[in-house]
Image: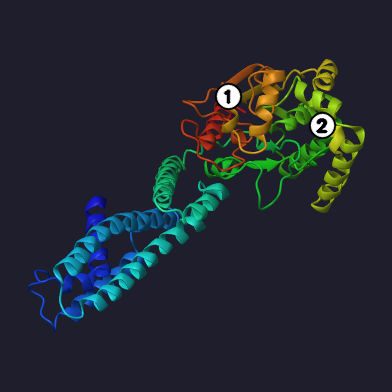
Amino acid sequence: MKYVRRAVYTLLLCLLANYLALISLPLSWPAVSAAAAPLCWVALLAAFIYINLRPLPRTAPTRRIQRLAEGCELLRLFAAGFALTCCLQLAWLWWVFWTGGEDGVPFMVLLDLLLVVLSLCVLFWNGMIRVYLTSVQLGIKHRLLAALCGWIPLVNLWYLAKIIRITGDEAEFETEKWELDETRTESEICKTKYPLLMVHGVFFRDFRYLNYWGRIPKELIRNGATVYYGQQQSAAAVEDSGRELAERIRQIVKETGCEKVNIIAHSKGGLDSRAAISHCSMAPYVATLTTINTPHRGCIFAEYLLGKVPEAVRQKIAAAYNAALRQVGDPNPDFLAAVADLTESACLARNGVTPDIPGVVYESVMSYCKKARHGKFPLNMTYPIVRHFDGLNDGLVSVESAKWGERFTLLEPEGKRGITHGDVVDLNRENIKGFDVREFYVKMAADLKRRGF
């Protein structure tokens, strides 16, 4: 049905765009009289407006997805209409200039070309604006490249096809995901006995409008989970962050009466959580700790860099970072302490005095990349360095360093695409083929519920 509608819409758009050319041909519009021609023009114009306002039926689950799908459809119609219009224009121009045409036709050629450009431009920009405003997967990179490629003939058509593919896949994927959630809403598969406490990694904060965990918390909540955040500082020594987390856990337990929490901690957040459990007497209030890409055994490359960077440079970087983060809410950030606690020697020494506490279930998850280009900046830059020092890694943390607890899960990337340190927490909001990050966390929470946590 959608292909029939698309073909009809393309035909109507081409009739409007090439209206003057078609009515000037001797064999065109044989049944349309001179009096009926304006009515045909009005009817085509009305169809053009309708197509631009509603290129698709309202079937998408949300307004954003609907606008995205409509924008993608408009770009498809533009591409098809552009191709067909080019053929019609070439045929008409050949007839005009090689057969002589009729009196006044050259002037009509200019008017028709103006009509073609105007109608196609409206169609193109209507679609492009919609996808630019609603797409998550285009990101900044594709938006900028599309703007640059738009000035290069043929390359612009290739990039238009790329945008149509990305936005079309996104609209389809998000629709299927929404429908899946709708079918299991009542079952509340993520409604665990204890709430989820999500603990961020180093150099980030739990901002209200820029979620560190991307689309994951919203997906968990839709499926019944209760979610809280660690809210510790972005950069501090592990022990200091552990004390902040301990206070946060006490606050949650006191306010909700939940007795315990299930901690899901990413990167350094896993080290902070272990410190809170082992050194701040939080074991009675923690049911499970699942660490995500956490450097339990440290990062050799971090130790190497600290040794190579001059003291003056380190202090200058630390001072700039600390000053900036105080402006966004950190009361006492300590850049150098956070980095030093991620080195191999610091982590190994800490492991010796930070035992796993009986009664708390410790588990870990890790992902990895296959090539540097799989990561966005700066992970694409750090990947080869970490690989040299630490081996197989996600751009920051090695697989061997992340193994901890009673159960270890290694996320194997499918095909050529890897899963980076940021991908595993949906930092870039990217849909990765073969790895649905939101569904991974839904299944993780569902498993905690199944086991009584």
Q: Identify the image quadrant of residue 426.
A: top right
Do the numbered discs 1 and 2 sit on residues whose CB atoms are within 8 Å?
A: no
Judge the density around disc 1: few (<14), some (14-19), many (≥20) Cα neighbours within 10 Å: few
User: Can you see residue 23?
Assistant: yes
| Residue 232 percent location from the top left of the image | 79, 41
Tell me which residue sits at (74%, 22%) in the image: 296
Along the viewing direction, whichever of 174 and 50 lies nearer the viewer: 50
In terms of secondary structure, where does tag 2 sit?
helix
**Identity of the amino acid at label 2?**
Val
Judge the density around disc 2: few (<14), some (14-19), many (≥20) Cα neighbours within 10 Å: many
User: Can you see residue 282?
Assistant: no
Q: Which dot marks residue 451?
A: 1
**Identity of the amino acid at label 1?**
Arg
Tell me which residue sits at (69%, 19%) in the image: 388
Q: Is residue 365 above or below residue 91?
A: above
| Residue 16 percent location from the top left of the image | 25, 69
Tell me which residue sits at (46%, 25%) in the image: 415
Q: Mark 1 or mark 2, which has the lower sequence index?
A: 2
Residue on which disc 2 sits:
339
Q: Is residue 201 above or below residue 324?
A: above
Along the viewing direction, whichever of 406 and 383 lies nearer the viewer: 383
Q: Is residue 183 above or below residue 371?
A: below
Along the viewing direction, whichever of 11 and 180 lies nearer the viewer: 11
In terms of secondary structure, where does tag 1 sit?
loop
Tell me which residue sits at (29%, 59%) in the image: 81
30 lies left or right of 274: left
79 lies left or right of 444: left
| Residue 10 percent location from the top left of the image | 26, 59
Question: Could you tell me how far apart the alpha carbons at marks 1 and 2 are, in whole angstroms?
Answer: 36 Å
Q: Which dot marks residue 378?
A: none
